[in-house]
Amino acid sequence: MKVETFPEWRDKGIDEVLYECRELLEDVEFPTANRWREAGGKILGHFQVYFPEEIAHAAGMLPFKMRGFPVEAVQSDSRFGSYLCSILKTNLEVALSGKLDLDMFVTHPICDAARNLAGVFGRNFDYPCEILYLPQNANSSHAVEYLRGEYERLKLRIESVVGHVVDDAELLNSVSVYNENRALIRELYAIRKDTPWSITVNDAYALLAVGGMIPREEHNGLLRHALPLIRGRDIKRQDKVRVVFEGGFCEQPPLDLIRTIGRSCYVVDDDLLIGLRWIVEDVPTEGDILFNLAESYVERSAHSPVQHDLRKPKEEMLKERVESAGAEAVIVTAAKMCEPGLEEQVAYVRWLDREGLPYFVSEFEENMTSFDHMEIQLETFVENLLFE
């Protein structure tokens, strides 16, 4: 469907482009989704962490990443228990309030709360609410075959929503679009590693995150426009510590918190919105496309606490991230009430202690508004590294 959902960045310099991305990211009226729907399009909302957007894209839907939003849980709070992470409540809130009108919702069993989210949505809305069961044992010889079957089941459900069959040519086109997108995102992260002073971590995050709110063709155009401008910036390098941020795989920290961290150090790599760049190489375009997507999830993928793969020990994966980014320290954080994230935090801290690598531990909630105490602590941590 030919509709431009985010035209505000066009014909603008890089500062204005990044401003528009930040504004869109925090706009809970969701203008891009509204423009898509006004043009007659359908929207599939999907929960963190990874979702094979190519399948929904091939069907002509707008895959919309439900990453949590800066809203108060007014209506949704009564649908959940007290001790649950904020992202569940804010995702449901934007749907209950009518701010985000979906045609289908998909979640994943990455934790007990996320698995039950489909049931909560299903009790409150008439549209299909599905659980996509990604393989729990990625090392099984049957994992790819199993996941290909799950993708086929998902495709059939999507076809029932859009009212037509998704053919191989449409799937192939979508994979090509997403392959380009992932390559452009890798280029963005390469800039952050090579010249982190060229773009702040909060601006880089906004440029990445809007990809989950607009058609991926539009995001490709935005990145093709922005990346050369970022490389061409004449910004003086500052004396900052290079750090890796670990703990943003599901619930996302507030943009102001990311900005606060960026004032004290260069964040040269992270796991923020890792699902948007989960597949680290091009998905093959020959043969069975659904099989290729499934195989790429298992064999050409990043790491996360929500995928159990014995070939990716969490400590080794963090070590690889630190070394490949040339980082001098690690910020180890977790969302409040996030059981997978808090468990990973313990494992990471033990490993960092053994390795003698400096680290800073914190936790966050997507709607926190005060960062002064953490900023003081982080500044002290960074100064100790710089002047020891």
Image (cartoon, rainbow, N blue to C red):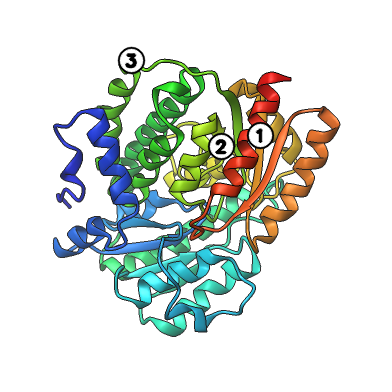
Mark 2 secondary-structure assignment: strand
Q: Residue at x 29, y 50 (%)?
A: 24
Identity, as a three-letter code, of the amino acid under mark 3:
Asp
**Upstream in sequence: badge 2 or badge 1:** 2
Cα separation between marks 2 and 1: 21 Å
Q: Read off the residue under disc 2.
A: 270
Q: Read off the residue under disc 1.
A: 380
From the viewer's perspective, is 95 left or right of 130? left
Identity, as a three-letter code, of the amino acid under mark 2:
Asp
Q: Is residue 94 above or below residue 220?
A: below
**Upstream in sequence: badge 3 or badge 1:** 3
Cα separation between marks 3 and 1: 29 Å
Q: Nearer the viewer, mark 2 or mark 3?
A: 3
Specify few, some or many for label 3: CA neighbours under 10 Å numbering under 14, 14-19, or 20 or more. Answer: few
Specify few, some or many for label 1: CA neighbours under 10 Å numbering under 14, 14-19, or 20 or more. Answer: few
Q: Read off the residue under disc 3.
A: 234
Residue 250: % across, % down: 55, 54
**Upstream in sequence: badge 2 or badge 3:** 3
